[in-house]
Image (cartoon, grey):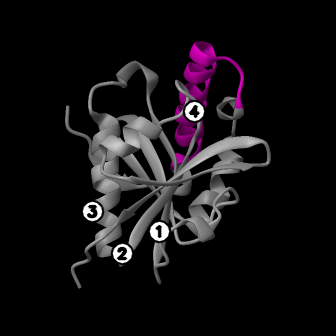
Amino acid sequence: MRLHWSFATTADAGAIATLRNAASDALTAKHGFGWWSGHGSAKGVLPDLRDAKILLGTHRGLLLATLRLTTRKPWAIDRAHFTPVQRPLFLTSLAVDPAHQRRGLGRQAMAEARRLAEAWPADALLLDAFDHPGAGAGAFYAKCGYREVARVTYRKARLIYYELPLSRTE
């Protein structure tokens, strides 16, 4: 199944929150309560839309995947652990509809993020993942070509930092 990619607008905030919450609930049901167990609202998505680009992956009108790209450093990222670059782009809030996971939609999302980042222009994509054997997506990011650069604890959350250097086309 191929996803159609577009940028979110404020009208999409409710659907984005619903998808993020469904992914969170699925992780909590499978792995217990953890940092991944939070819920958000449409109102909470609106600031993301102001300072970032949110991608929507749809198929036949259904929102099946979303992620956020921003030049603004997320709270849990310590740039000291990454390769220094002039123009980093941060990837956060990747979510795939739990009913459609393990079908390549996450890989499509990561490929689209890379395509957009190379045209942004950005020098690297940076992200973090929970350091948890099941609820963390570290192995997934490694399969997508990201390199682990550090394992840290930030506000009691164990995280793994990943980076993907980019070759831009200018």
User: Under tag 2, what secondary structure?
Assistant: loop
Which residue is label 4 attached to? 18
Question: Which residue in the structure is indicated by mark 3?
Answer: 115
Which comes sooner in the sequence, label 2 or label 4?
Answer: 4
Residue 9 is situated, as x and y percent measured from the top left of the image, at: 50, 57
Quadrant assignment, res 29: top right
Give the residue type that dot 3 points to: Arg
> Secondary structure beneath disc 3?
helix
Residue 168 included in the magenta stretch of the image: no
Q: Residue at x 32, y 24 (%)?
A: 102
Q: Residues within 10 Å of mark 2 (few under 14, many from 20)?
A: some
Q: Is 10 left or right of 113, judged from the image as shown?
A: right
Mark 1 highlights which residue?
A: 89
Q: Check disc 4 and give the amino acid type.
A: Thr
Q: Are the residues at dot 1 and dot 2 in contact (C-beta closer than 8 Å)?
A: yes
What's the residue at 65%, 64% (across, down)?
78
Q: Earlier in the sequence, mark 3 or mark 4?
A: 4
Tag 2 near tag 3, CB within 8 Å: no
- What percent of the width, then of the height, locates residue 45? 63, 50
Give the number of the mark in front: 3 or 4. Answer: 3
Looking at the image, which residue is at 67% across and 41% down?
158
Can residue 23 be found in the magenta stretch?
yes
The residue most toward the top is 29
User: First in sequence: mark 3 or mark 1?
Assistant: 1
**Circle 2 sits on which residue?**
120
Q: Is residue 155 left or right of residue 109?
A: right
Question: Toward the viewer: 2 or 91?
Answer: 91
Q: Is residue 93 left or right of residue 114?
A: right
Main secondary structure found in the magenta portion = helix
Task: Work out how far the residue at label 2 is from the one at label 4, CA to CA, in angstroms.
Answer: 28 Å
